[in-house]
């Protein structure tokens, strides 16, 4: 590339510490502008003069229909597109830009101090901590801000619609009852970009509960109004004959919402996941369809979030046409898979498949179900000669995992479809911001934390290859506190993790099992493991054909999109498709209403048809346009360029495990396969406050050496009780003002896993 090339100059500028800071601030400012525009329109701060100007434009640009007249999308809808759609799309673009920004090796100390203080403030646990922990899993400053915006939106709309509709409540006035109409102006969707999967799921649940509460009040208060008016069944069963609102469709929408809400409670999610998952999909579609039939202009509220979802669905569809395979790693202890507590699966991916620690993937095993997608967190991402190996740990829990382990015990491989998020987000690298880390895990929840450790081990090896010195690797100091009920679960880590515990990793293992004794000795376990490894290479025989893949072949996992530019094109086409669908619906709306006027037909009785036509036009165009122009051509090109050597074989799995040295948990120790390293298992529960104090002293020493505030990143991954205990302990250690009462150290809490 030429020396004076603008791209090279931009890269050099971004590589400079202050250049990277300026770019980061610019992206953050862009996010603020996007959300400001969204809320500017959402709070109805648009003046009448703005709408009149757009009315004038549309009188010139409007579509002239065959029956005469100019009818088109009006000024209100145009402003909706301009402020709400454009701001959402721009925020998505900025999220892609933030992914592409380079990370300089060093940042200015002023900026590092500022971000450390800001991070501690935003993640400070608000009091009363125990109540918030029990009620909603904790309430940080940023949680309170998001929740406050959500409530403020609804309070504003309450007073707005109350003033508009107060004159209509004649029956309540006659009965001496005061009614406060509550409406919901926005959907939860994906309004917040850049959140972790765990945080996104948490906000999704909060807004989902809030949405159903407001919608239930909305429907029930109307039913009460009709009872007082003396015409309950007349309005309830009305199919849009009284005015432009279809009340019966609204009742169906409310019913779908209640079913979705009831099947989403924690008890149903954990005990009957298949019921929860299928009801979530079916009831979501039913709720949207009948809501738009209920009031045909509801699309203006739903569509901004639905278009983001449509773009995401199209991106994920890039992986759905290819079938890959998952190979099981047989237990090092020699036990059968059906007796094992945790099963490890390897999935082979191509070199251009991007995955990193804290990356979640969804797996579907067609031999079990063609509809069930289950989320898993990556436990390791290792580079192999043929590409990348993704490793996940699956605990024997429930019907699905029982069927999965039973089939793996018989075949040792299974065809699998994989769905993964697009690219890498900043939150997946948040652990790199800390010089001292405390990992607290319970059972199989260790997976994302093991992935971080494995990533650091890979960085250390790369540094040793370049400089041939251990000092060249400058990673964070990590303390891992791992608690398991079954000592077999400690076998999820390998010898590399034990070796790291001699350097920058402090490893503390705790067992809460009642019986710690095993029926065989460590020597016997090693012997069994050797025969097991020899058995793997001969047992893995993959099918060479499948009707669901490239030319009937099982291939390596491929990325859903090519790069960030490809993702930007797909999302842009989704929004353009939604806009074209809106104009198609408006065209049908204008033609039909012109016909109704000529035929002297009451058009108000058929507005539900307008809503239904709008829904299908917008949905088909928002999904079909990006798929036809951005996904399908790529898939056709890949099929055309398909080569026989791209077919997955058992040798790929054997090569991927060539350097894998497992561990064996026996009695009170975890020992590596070669017997060179071992670590003791403590028979008790960890003292979390004591562990925080121990890590605080390490952070103090590190902070003095680098001249930055003493800060510890605390990552917790495990069951609900463990998360709540760590959250309370961190809140107490930080004190009431967030300044850090534990030896002047502040603790920043992160949840590495999402609770089902």
Image (cartoon, rainbow, N blue to C red):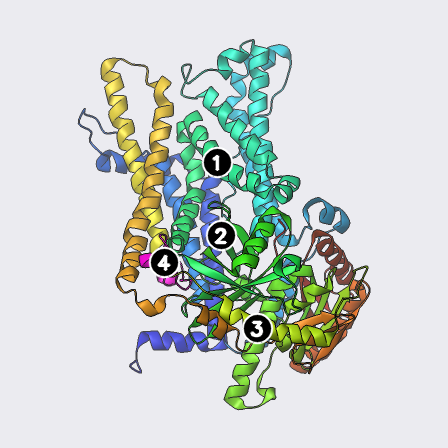
Magenta residues, as a range? 546-567
Q: Are marks 3 and 2 in contact (CB under 8 Å)?
A: no
Q: Nearer the viewer, mark 1 or mark 4?
A: 4
Q: Which quadrant holds residue 672?
A: bottom right
Element type at marker 2?
A: loop
Badge 3: residue crowd in 10 Å (few <14, some 14–19, many ≥20): some
Front-most of 455 and 311? 455
Query: Dividing the picture into quarters, in which one does residue 112 lie?
Result: bottom right
Q: Label 3, label 2: how many angstroms apart (C-alpha)? A: 25 Å
Q: Secondary structure at mark 4?
A: loop
* Left or right of 464, for residue 30: left
Separation of residues labelled 3 and 1 (CA atoms): 45 Å
Quarter placement of the N terminus: bottom left
- Estimate the spatial distance between the alpha carbons at disc 2 and disc 1, rounded to whole Å: 21 Å
Disc 4 designates what residue?
Answer: 545
Dot 1 falls on a residue whose secondary structure is: helix
Looking at the image, which residue is at 29% across and 14% down? 601
Report the residue at 32% width, 67% height from top.
644
Q: Which residue is mark 1?
A: 282
Q: Residue 592, how many percent across, how many down? A: 26, 24
Could you tell which of marks 1 and 4 lies nearer the N-terminus? 1
Q: Residue furthest top?
A: 230
The label shown at residue 365 is 2
Q: Is residue 559 magenta?
A: yes
Label 3: which residue? 533
Helix, strand or loop under label 3: helix
Q: How many residues crowd mark 4 within 10 Å: few (<14), some (14–19), many (20+)?
A: some
């Amino acid at each position: 590339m030429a020396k004076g090339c603008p791209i090279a100059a931009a890269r050099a500028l971004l590589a400079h510490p202050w250049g990277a800071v300026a770019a980061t601030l610019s992206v953050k400012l862009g996010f603020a502008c996007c959300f400001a525009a969204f809320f500017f329109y959402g709070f109805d701060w648009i003046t009448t003069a703005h709408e009149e100007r757009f009315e004038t434009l549309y009188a010139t640009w409007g579509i002239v229909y065959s029956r005469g007249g100019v009818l088109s999308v009006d000024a209100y809808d145009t402003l909706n597109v301009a402020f709400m759609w454009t701001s959402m799309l721009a925020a998505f673009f900025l999220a892609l830009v933030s992914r592409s920004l380079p990370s300089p090796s060093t940042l200015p100390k002023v900026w590092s101090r500022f971000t450390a203080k800001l991070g501690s403030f935003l993640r400070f646990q608000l009091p009363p901590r125990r109540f918030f922990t029990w009620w909603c899993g904790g309430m940080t400053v940023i949680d309170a801000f998001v929740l406050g915006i959500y409530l403020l939106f609804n309070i504003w709309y309450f007073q707005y619609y109350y003033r508009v509709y107060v004159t209509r409540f004649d029956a309540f006035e006659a009965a001496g009852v005061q009614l406060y109409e509550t409406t919901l102006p926005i959907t939860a969707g994906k309004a917040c970009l850049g959140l972790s999967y765990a945080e996104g799921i948490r906000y999704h649940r909060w807004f989902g509960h809030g949405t159903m509460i407001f919608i239930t009040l909305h429907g029930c208060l109307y039913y009460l109004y009709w009872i007082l008016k003396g015409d309950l069944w007349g309005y309830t069963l009305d199919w849009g004959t009284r005015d432009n609102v279809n009340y019966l469709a609204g009742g169906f929408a409310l019913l779908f919402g209640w079913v979705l809400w009831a099947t989403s409670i924690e008890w149903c999610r954990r005990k009957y996941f298949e019921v929860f998952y299928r009801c979530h999909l079916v009831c979501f579609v039913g709720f949207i369809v009948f809501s738009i039939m209920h009031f045909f202009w509801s699309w203006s509220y739903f569509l901004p979030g639905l278009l983001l979802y449509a773009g995401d669905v199209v991106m994920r569809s890039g992986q759905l046409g290819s079938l890959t395979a998952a190979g099981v790693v047989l237990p090092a202890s020699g036990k059968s898979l059906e007796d094992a507590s945790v099963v490890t699966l390897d999935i082979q991916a191509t070199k251009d498949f991007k995955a990193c620690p804290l990356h979640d993937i969804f797996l579907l095993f067609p031999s079990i179900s063609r509809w069930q997608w289950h989320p898993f967190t990556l436990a390791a991402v290792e580079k192999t000669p043929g590409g990348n190996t993704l490793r996940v740990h699956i605990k024997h829990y429930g019907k699905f995992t029982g069927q999965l382990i039973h089939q793996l015990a018989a075949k040792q491989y299974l065809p699998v479809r994989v769905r993964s998020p697009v690219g890498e987000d900043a939150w997946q690298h948040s652990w790199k911001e800390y010089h001292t880390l405390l990992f607290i895990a319970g059972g199989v929840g260790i997976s994302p934390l093991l992935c971080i450790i494995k990533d650091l081990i890979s960085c250390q090896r790369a540094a040793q290859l370049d400089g041939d010195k251990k000092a060249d690797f400058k990673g964070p100091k990590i303390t891992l506190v791992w608690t398991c009920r079954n000592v077999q679960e400690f076998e999820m880590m390998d010898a590399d993790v034990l070796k790291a515990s001699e350097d920058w990793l402090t490893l503390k293992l705790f067992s809460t099992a009642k019986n710690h004794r095993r029926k065989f000795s460590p020597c016997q376990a090693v012997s069994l493991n050797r025969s097991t490894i020899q058995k793997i290479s001969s047992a893995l025989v993959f099918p060479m054909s499948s009707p669901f893949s490239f030319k009937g072949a099982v291939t390596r996992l491929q990325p859903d999109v090519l790069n960030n530019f490809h993702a930007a094109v797909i999302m842009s086409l989704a929004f353009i498709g939604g806009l074209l669908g809106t104009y198609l619906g408006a065209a049908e709306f204008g033609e039909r209403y012109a016909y109704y006027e000529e035929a002297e037909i009451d058009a108000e009785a058929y507005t539900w048809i307008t809503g239904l036509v709008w829904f299908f036009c917008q949905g088909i165009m928002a999904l079909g346009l990006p798929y036809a122009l951005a996904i399908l051509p790529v898939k056709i090109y890949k099929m055309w360029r398909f080569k026989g050597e791209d077919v997955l074989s058992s040798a790929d799995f054997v090569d991927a495990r060539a350097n894998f040295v497992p561990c064996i948990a026996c009695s009170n120790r975890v020992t590596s396969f070669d017997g060179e390293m071992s670590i003791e298992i403590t028979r008790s529960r960890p003292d979390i406050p004591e562990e925080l104090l121990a890590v605080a002293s390490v952070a103090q020493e590190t902070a003095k050496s680098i001249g930055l505030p003493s800060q510890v990143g605390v990552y917790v991954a495990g069951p609900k009780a463990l998360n709540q205990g760590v959250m309370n302990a961190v809140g107490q250690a930080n004190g009431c003002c967030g300044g850090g009462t534990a030896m002047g150290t502040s603790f920043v809490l992160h949840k590495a896993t999402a609770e089902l």
